[in-house]
Image (cartoon, rainbow, N blue to C red):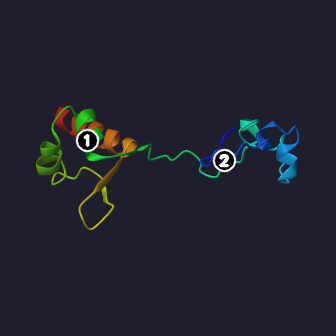
Amino acid sequence: MRGAKGHRSDFAQMRNAAETLHFSAIRLGQRNPQDYPQHYPPSHLGEPMDIEDVAELLGCSVWTVRQRYLPEGLPHIRASARGRFIFFREQVVDWILERQTKGES
C-alpha cells in the first residue's frame, strides 16, 4: 500500500499483523460480530429523529410540526440552545395513536 508520501508499507501483507499490535485476530469485532460486546441496548424510545424525519412521518411540513404539533404536545427534547429538536420514533408514534383514539370517542 502506498501512503501519502509514496512510502510503501508491508505491514498489511504481514500474516501476523494483528498479533504484532497485541490484538488477537479471532477477537476482533469485525471478524466475529457475534462476539462484539453490545454497549448500547436497543432503546424502547426507538431511533432518534430530526424535525424533517418527523414531518415526513406525519405527512406535513417542518413549519407545521413547529407551529402546530409542538404546541399541542408532540414529545421532543431540545438538544441545544440554538433550537435543534430531537424526537424519538416510538414516542412520536405513541403520540399519534393517542390522538387518534381520543378523536374516536
Q: Which of the 4 image quarters holds residue 76?
A: bottom left
Query: In the rendered image, which quarter contains the C terminus?
Result: top left
Residue that badge 1 annotates = 52
- Residue 55: image location, x then y, percent: 22, 38
View extreme (bottom): residue: 81
Using the numbered discs, state the Cα–Cα distance from disc 2 to disc 1 in whole angstroms: 29 Å
Which SS class for mark 1?
helix
Check residue 38 in the rendering and tell me which mark sits there, or answer none: 2
Marks 2 and 1, the one that precedes in the sequence: 2
| In the image, residue 72 above or below residue 31 | below
Residue at screen point 25% across, 41% down = 52
Q: Residue 60 at what x, y percent from top left? A: 16, 35
Query: Which residue corresponds to the image point at 82% horizontal and 44% vertical from the top-left?
Result: 27
Q: Are marks 2 and 1 in contact (CB under 8 Å)?
A: no
Residue 102 x, y percent position in the rendering: 21, 39
Locate residue 97: give its quadrant.
top left
Residue shown at the point (29%, 52%) measured from the top left: 75
The location of residue 19, given as percent across then percent down, is 87, 48
* Disc 2 element: loop
User: Callout 1, which amino acid?
Assistant: Glu
